[in-house]
Amino acid sequence: MTTSALKTQLPPFLDTLRKRAILSDGAMVTMIYQKGIYINQCFENLNTERPHLVKNVHLEFLQAGAEVLETNTFNASPIKLSKFGLADKVREINLAGVRLAREAAGGTAWIAGLVGPPGRQVEDAYEPSQREWLAESYVRQIEALHEGGVDAFFLEAFSRLEILELVAETAKRLHPDVPCAAMVDLAEDGRTRFGDGMDRIAEVLESLPAEVVGFSDGVGPPVLNRAIEELRPRTKKLLALLPGAGLPVTFEDRLLNMATPEYFMELLRQGMQKGARLIGGSSGCHPEHIRAIRGSLKMLQPGTAPAMASAGTVESAERPAEVRPPEFETPSALAAKLRAGEFAVSIEIDPPIGTEAGRALEAAKQCRDAGIDAINIADGPRATARMGPIDMAMLLRDEVPGIEPIVHFCCRDRNLLGMQADLIGANALGIYNVLMITGDPPKLGDYPFATAVYDVDAIGALRIAANLNTGKDLAGNPLKGAPTRLFLGAGANPGAIDLDHEIHRLEQKIEAGAGYILTQPVYDSALYERFHKRIEHLRVPILLGILPLASYRNAEFLTKEVPGMHVPSPIRERLRRCEDKESSRQCGIEIAREALEAALPSIQGTYIMPPFNRVDSALAVLEVARERMTPPRAMGASGGVVDDRR
């Protein structure tokens, strides 16, 4: 392999990390041990003694989706190597470690020079008088890694903060242009092994000459997730989260190993939502863990997402600037109604699981006869195999004239070419209302091993569709014929854990082309009021999501199994007290009415999701909004400006 082929053929590591999350690899040592190397050997010496073994581990992580390969040099400082009589091989071992990672990557991944702590014996007995000796030891390793050509230094699993500070300062003094990530190892109580709490940890990390700070190794993702959440408001630096797979836990007197790839992925996804930007695994993490994280990463921020705003207070001291979508001509009757400031109603009807669409069409007729404006058609909800939403929309248009479809457009199942093809086709067929969603991951449905595409997320999909509305495809090629005339929508979750991040993404969705917003179901009026107060600067119509619950079991399922859904415990308790099926349904309708009625002054419509396509439940909820409802408009209206009254 040529020298040029070994160079990273990617944008600068730090520039990319400022724009989106980057996925690092897992545990080299764990993998080497499982390949039959005893723990009493020097694993770093394998860089020279058994290079193919090390390189193959790198390849396994690369094939799993890792974008950063960490060199097999965690214990390659003179202090650690001297225990094996290898202190004179520091340069050779570190250079070989970089070379093997580069050969495996072939220019397709960043290479991080991994630097670990000096060991418990040194950490426990550390005195300031040892600073110069310790720094000199790390100089030899850092210089060798830099000579090999690393894209960044990763300082991982440090418990003694003074030593982490020393190593970071040494790396930056020697090579100020190489990005540095400094990570602390925490115990189960969220403190370092030396008793440092978050106040002290945050103070040190913020003062370090490192662009990225955070946590690695430790006792597993739950502890480090909490630590990331506490650290985020205390630093302006980018955050790193590279946890170990975790220790077994005791549950009802049983010792359980929870470190499955799915469990790890779910917890790391939560860490990303709390602000982690550099993510990956450490002790105990296999390629399967990285592969699972990769799928979650693609779902949360596919493609190149804009940098996340730094954490701040919930209430901004300054009034945010108004955010408006670009205007496009469209024949959509829904667009005409919303742009005129009228109240609009949509009811969701799931497409059939199979070829028989009769029941869904009958439900749509009920909606049309009741004066409903539109039918929402989901796209493979909960990752199940159903009739496609565009096909269902065509049946609806032919069999139930007088009511418009809103097709959900899921990023999970389409690459960039497929997305553009389907959008252009929908427009040609007269299907203009499109709701852009990222989509549930396949693991939630009947096909957990199906490949999720996620070339882009909902924001990226909106940009693609808005581009088609200007008459050009994503590559900038002009469309033959007229531009598309799609009326684009997006979703929002008023109950998001990180409301700052949710609103930041919502602003991006509107700027990307969203002309209306449908929310996740709301049951808590105080929660929605908080959300509405934060989005008053967004100049698009909001259609409140309402899901009339069918039973206590239905509420429990939604809370525990459906991403983005949460039914408050007092609501679930009301349903639990119901005596039978019918009283549960009536209670669910009453709860939905209360939520809708409370929000009526601040919304421009509602989006009702009746369980099991029970249109009668949806219509019963709407009784509290009858005074706001107006007859549906006919297709063909276009233009106008977004009305601010809502």
Image: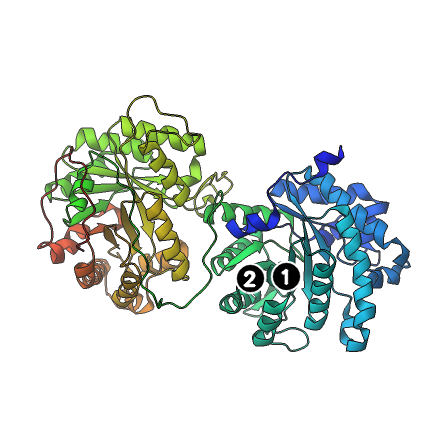
Q: Amino acid at mark 1?
A: Ala
Q: Which quadrant of the view contains residue 62?
A: top right
Q: Position of residue 607 (x, y in %)?
A: 23, 50
**Residue nearer the viewer, 549 or 563:** 563
* Mark 2 vs 1: CB contact within 8 A: yes
Q: Position of residue 631 (x, y in %)?
A: 9, 44
**Residue nearer the viewer, 189 or 162:** 162
| On screen, residue 281 above or below 133 | above
Q: Is residue 420 left or right of residue 41?
A: left
Outermost top residue: 480
Q: Which residue is mark 1?
A: 210
Q: Amino acid at mark 2?
A: Lys
> Going 63% across and 76% down the picture, which residue do you hit?
196
Earlier residue among tags 2 and 1: 1
**Residue nearer the viewer, 291 or 90:** 90
Q: Is residue 627 left or right of residue 470?
A: left
Q: Position of residue 635 (x, y in %)?
A: 15, 34
